[in-house]
Protein backbone atom coordinates (compact mmCIF):
# COMPACT_ATOMS: atom_id res chain seq x y z
CA UNK A 1 0.00 0.00 0.00
CA UNK A 2 1.30 3.45 -0.77
CA UNK A 3 0.34 7.03 -0.04
CA UNK A 4 1.26 9.49 -2.78
CA UNK A 5 1.22 13.28 -2.59
CA UNK A 6 1.58 14.70 -6.07
CA UNK A 7 0.90 18.36 -6.95
CA UNK A 8 -2.24 18.75 -4.79
CA UNK A 9 -3.42 15.15 -5.19
CA UNK A 10 -3.54 12.49 -2.46
CA UNK A 11 -3.78 8.92 -3.73
CA UNK A 12 -3.83 5.83 -1.52
CA UNK A 13 -3.29 2.72 -3.65
CA UNK A 14 -1.45 -0.51 -4.31
CA UNK A 15 1.47 0.79 -6.43
CA UNK A 16 2.15 -2.54 -8.18
CA UNK A 17 -1.37 -2.76 -9.61
CA UNK A 18 -2.64 0.78 -10.18
CA UNK A 19 0.10 1.95 -12.57
CA UNK A 20 -0.80 -0.58 -15.31
CA UNK A 21 -3.20 1.11 -17.77
CA UNK A 22 -4.56 0.27 -21.21
CA UNK A 23 -4.73 2.53 -24.29
CA UNK A 24 -7.91 4.24 -23.00
CA UNK A 25 -6.20 5.13 -19.70
CA UNK A 26 -8.26 2.53 -17.79
CA UNK A 27 -6.54 0.57 -15.06
CA UNK A 28 -5.84 -3.00 -16.14
CA UNK A 29 -6.06 -4.33 -12.60
CA UNK A 30 -9.08 -3.07 -10.68
CA UNK A 31 -7.72 -2.40 -7.18
CA UNK A 32 -9.02 -0.39 -4.25
CA UNK A 33 -8.08 3.27 -3.93
CA UNK A 34 -8.89 6.61 -2.32
CA UNK A 35 -8.29 9.58 -4.63
CA UNK A 36 -8.50 13.22 -3.53
CA UNK A 37 -7.30 15.99 -5.83
CA UNK A 38 -7.32 19.22 -3.83
CA UNK A 39 -5.81 21.32 -6.62
CA UNK A 40 -8.25 20.43 -9.43
CA UNK A 41 -11.75 21.31 -8.24
CA UNK A 42 -13.34 19.44 -11.15
CA UNK A 43 -12.17 16.02 -9.96
CA UNK A 44 -14.35 14.46 -7.23
CA UNK A 45 -13.18 12.60 -4.14
CA UNK A 46 -13.36 8.93 -5.17
CA UNK A 47 -13.33 5.84 -2.97
CA UNK A 48 -13.57 2.29 -4.27
CA UNK A 49 -12.19 0.34 -7.19
CA UNK A 50 -9.98 2.19 -9.64
CA UNK A 51 -12.19 1.62 -12.70
CA UNK A 52 -15.55 2.03 -10.99
CA UNK A 53 -15.44 3.78 -7.62
CA UNK A 54 -18.64 3.14 -5.64
CA UNK A 55 -18.49 6.46 -3.80
CA UNK A 56 -17.77 9.96 -5.13
CA UNK A 57 -18.26 13.46 -3.75
CA UNK A 58 -18.14 16.41 -6.15
CA UNK A 59 -16.72 19.75 -5.05
CA UNK A 60 -20.26 21.24 -5.05
CA UNK A 61 -21.27 18.65 -2.42
CA UNK A 62 -23.10 16.26 -4.76
CA UNK A 63 -22.65 12.69 -3.53
CA UNK A 64 -22.77 9.61 -5.75
CA UNK A 65 -23.03 6.20 -4.05
CA UNK A 66 -24.21 2.82 -5.30
CA UNK A 67 -25.68 1.96 -1.90
CA UNK A 68 -26.01 3.61 1.48
CA UNK A 69 -27.31 3.55 5.01
CA UNK A 70 -28.01 6.76 6.86
CA UNK A 71 -29.02 7.46 10.43
CA UNK A 72 -30.37 10.68 11.83
CA UNK A 73 -32.19 13.32 9.82
CA UNK A 74 -31.87 13.82 6.08
CA UNK A 75 -33.02 17.26 4.96
CA UNK A 76 -33.93 17.66 1.31
CA UNK A 77 -36.45 19.38 -0.92
CA UNK A 78 -36.79 16.43 -3.33
CA UNK A 79 -36.42 12.65 -3.24
CA UNK A 80 -36.07 10.98 -6.64
CA UNK A 81 -36.18 7.21 -6.92
CA UNK A 82 -37.88 4.35 -8.75
CA UNK A 83 -39.59 3.49 -5.46
CA UNK A 84 -39.65 4.59 -1.83
CA UNK A 85 -40.17 2.16 1.04
CA UNK A 86 -39.79 2.28 4.80
CA UNK A 87 -38.33 -1.26 4.63
CA UNK A 88 -40.89 -3.11 6.74
CA UNK A 89 -43.77 -3.32 4.26
CA UNK A 90 -46.05 -0.76 5.90
CA UNK A 91 -45.32 2.06 3.44
CA UNK A 92 -44.35 1.95 -0.24
CA UNK A 93 -44.64 4.29 -3.25
CA UNK A 94 -43.61 3.15 -6.75
CA UNK A 95 -42.46 5.31 -9.68
CA UNK A 96 -46.01 5.59 -11.07
CA UNK A 97 -47.32 7.01 -7.77
CA UNK A 98 -49.04 3.84 -6.53
CA UNK A 99 -48.94 3.99 -2.74
CA UNK A 100 -49.42 1.25 -0.16
CA UNK A 101 -49.82 2.35 3.45
CA UNK A 102 -50.98 0.09 6.29
CA UNK A 103 -52.51 3.04 8.16
CA UNK A 104 -52.80 6.77 7.82
CA UNK A 105 -54.54 9.99 8.72
CA UNK A 106 -55.43 12.33 5.89
CA UNK A 107 -56.62 15.93 6.08
CA UNK A 108 -57.77 18.16 3.28
CA UNK A 109 -59.47 17.01 0.10
CA UNK A 110 -59.40 13.39 -1.02
CA UNK A 111 -60.38 12.82 -4.66
CA UNK A 112 -61.11 9.39 -6.13
CA UNK A 113 -62.81 8.13 -9.29
CA UNK A 114 -62.56 4.49 -8.31
CA UNK A 115 -61.86 2.43 -5.20
CA UNK A 116 -63.26 0.98 -2.02
CA UNK A 117 -63.62 2.49 1.44
CA UNK A 118 -65.32 1.05 4.52
CA UNK A 119 -67.39 -1.51 2.59
CA UNK A 120 -68.47 1.01 -0.07
CA UNK A 121 -67.44 0.95 -3.73
CA UNK A 122 -66.48 4.24 -5.41
CA UNK A 123 -67.30 4.22 -9.13
CA UNK A 124 -66.98 7.08 -11.61
CA UNK A 125 -70.59 8.25 -11.11
CA UNK A 126 -71.80 6.50 -7.96
CA UNK A 127 -71.11 5.23 -4.47
CA UNK A 128 -72.66 1.91 -3.47
CA UNK A 129 -72.29 -0.77 -0.87
CA UNK A 130 -70.49 -4.02 -1.71
CA UNK A 131 -73.76 -5.97 -1.80
CA UNK A 132 -75.14 -3.37 -4.26
CA UNK A 133 -78.32 -2.85 -2.26
CA UNK A 134 -77.81 0.90 -1.74
CA UNK A 135 -76.67 3.38 -4.43
CA UNK A 136 -75.93 7.09 -4.35
CA UNK A 137 -75.36 8.48 -7.84
CA UNK A 138 -73.58 11.71 -8.83
CA UNK A 139 -76.96 13.46 -9.29
CA UNK A 140 -77.69 12.87 -5.59
CA UNK A 141 -80.31 10.16 -6.15
CA UNK A 142 -80.34 7.41 -3.52
CA UNK A 143 -81.64 3.98 -4.56
CA UNK A 144 -81.92 0.88 -2.46
CA UNK A 145 -83.94 -2.05 -1.29
CA UNK A 146 -84.58 -0.49 2.12
CA UNK A 147 -83.92 3.16 2.84
Image (cartoon, rainbow, N blue to C red):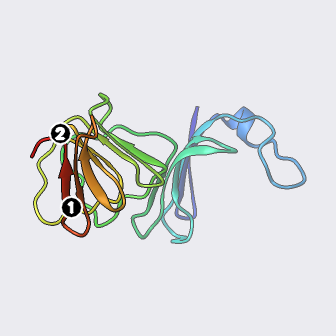
Does residue 114 lie above or below 50 as drawn?
below
Callout 1 crowding tier (Cα within 10 Å): few <14, some 14–19, many ≥20: few
In what element is the residue under mark 2? loop
Tell me: 12 left or right of 76: right
Tell me: 76 left or right of 95: left
First reached walking from the N terminus: tag 1 or tag 2: 1
**Quarter of the image with the N terminus in it:** top right
The mark tally for this picture is 2
Callout 2 crowding tier (Cα within 10 Å): few <14, some 14–19, many ≥20: few
Residue 53 in the image, given as x and y percentages of width and height: 59, 45
Residue 101 in the image, given as x and y percentages of width and height: 26, 40
Tell me: 51 left or right of 74: right
In what element is the residue under mark 1? loop
Which residue is denoted by mark 2 in the rendering?
Answer: 118
Which residue is denoted by mark 1 in the rendering?
Answer: 110
In three-dimensional space, the C-alpha distance between marks 1 and 2, rounded to whole angstroms, equals 15 Å
Res 113 quadrant in image: bottom left
Amino acid sequence: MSLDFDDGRILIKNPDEIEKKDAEDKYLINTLMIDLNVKDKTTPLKIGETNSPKFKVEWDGTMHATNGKFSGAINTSTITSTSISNGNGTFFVDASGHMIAKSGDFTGTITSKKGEIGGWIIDTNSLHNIGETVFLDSAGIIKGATI
